[in-house]
Image (cartoon, grey):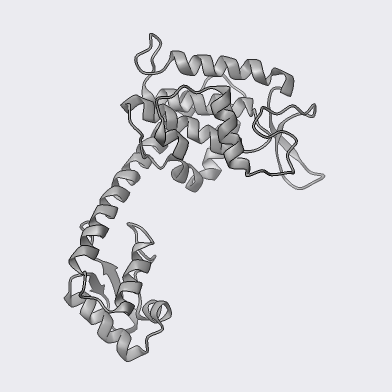
Amino acid sequence: MADLYQAPGAALTPERLFTWHRMLMHDRRDLATVEQYRQHAAPMQIVSCQIGDERVHYEAPPSARVPAEMAALLDWFARTAPGQPDALPAITRAAIAHLWFECIHPFEDGNGRIGRAIAEMALAQATGTPSFTGMSAVLNRQRKSYYEQLRRHSVRLDIDAWLQWFAQQALQAQAEADELVRFLIDKAALMTRLSGQLNPRQEKALLRLLREGPQGFAGGLSAGNYARITGAPPATVTRDLADLVNKGALRRTGERKGARYWLVIAGK
């Protein structure tokens, strides 16, 4: 992803894909081929269930066909880029490129991650700048539905339902990315405003809470959470939390053991 963000407009070539594959595999020695397309004679199958009760969901083209299949995909990807005669809308191009790549399954391992990077690349090329969409994070959360969509549409030519599903995930990813960027800006503003006003315990607890991102702790920060994070005794916990509320860093809901604390950030 770092390589992609540094040069989103660079051509997608076999050499670039091989570089991504080498980065992902980290010199793994259990693979026969790294930094090149798969070459084994055995079928490349997507299988589930227990050993002895396997279910083959999909069988990719044999290794001997992979170079030709990838050449066709990369040629199409170049011809459909923004500014080209066959240019496609960004999300349509990203969805097709990702599904097509996963159908070929050109590497021994890492196909999902590289395929998602290709989708991110298509989205970035539409704006001419590196794009931060968080597509992989959304697909990871929706992985059961994601794998089912891939399984269903890897064996048919009608992919309208795949395009619609992928578009929904892409829009959700962009909305979450926007929320995260706003959160990071507000986080910096909050810590700048409180600079010099927090004791070490309060700063440690706030930073831990901020690491959870825009949603914060599930169910809110409790006094027990604060004590575990800081090691403070109950009386100190009570004073610290009350002070953070007074300083406008936290908002309290509930009473006594049901009291929970929420970041006052990004309109929350």
What is the x, y in percent for residue 236?
Answer: 31, 88
Of 176 and 204, the residue lying toward us: 204
Of 38 and 7, the residue lying toward us: 7
What is the x, y in percent for residue 174?
Answer: 34, 40
Q: Name above or below for residue 249 compared with residue 114.
A: below
Can residue 228 be seen from the camera position used here?
yes
Q: Split into 4 quadrants, where in the image is the C terminus?
A: bottom left
Q: Quadrant of residue 2?
A: top left
What is the x, y in percent for residue 214?
Answer: 32, 57
What is the x, y in percent for residue 150?
Answer: 57, 32
Q: Quadrant of residue 255?
A: bottom left
In the orientation shown, which residue stands out farthest toward the top? 85
Q: Quadrant of residue 167?
A: top left
Q: Name above or below for residue 266 compared with residue 206.
A: above
Residue sitting at x 56%, y 29%: 17
Residue sitting at x 74%, y 43%: 30
In the orientation shown, which residue stands out farthest toward the right? 52
Can residue 148 be seen from the camera position used here?
no
In this rendering, position of residue 169 left or right of residue 128: right
Q: How many marks?
A: 0
Residue sitting at x 58%, y 23%: 14
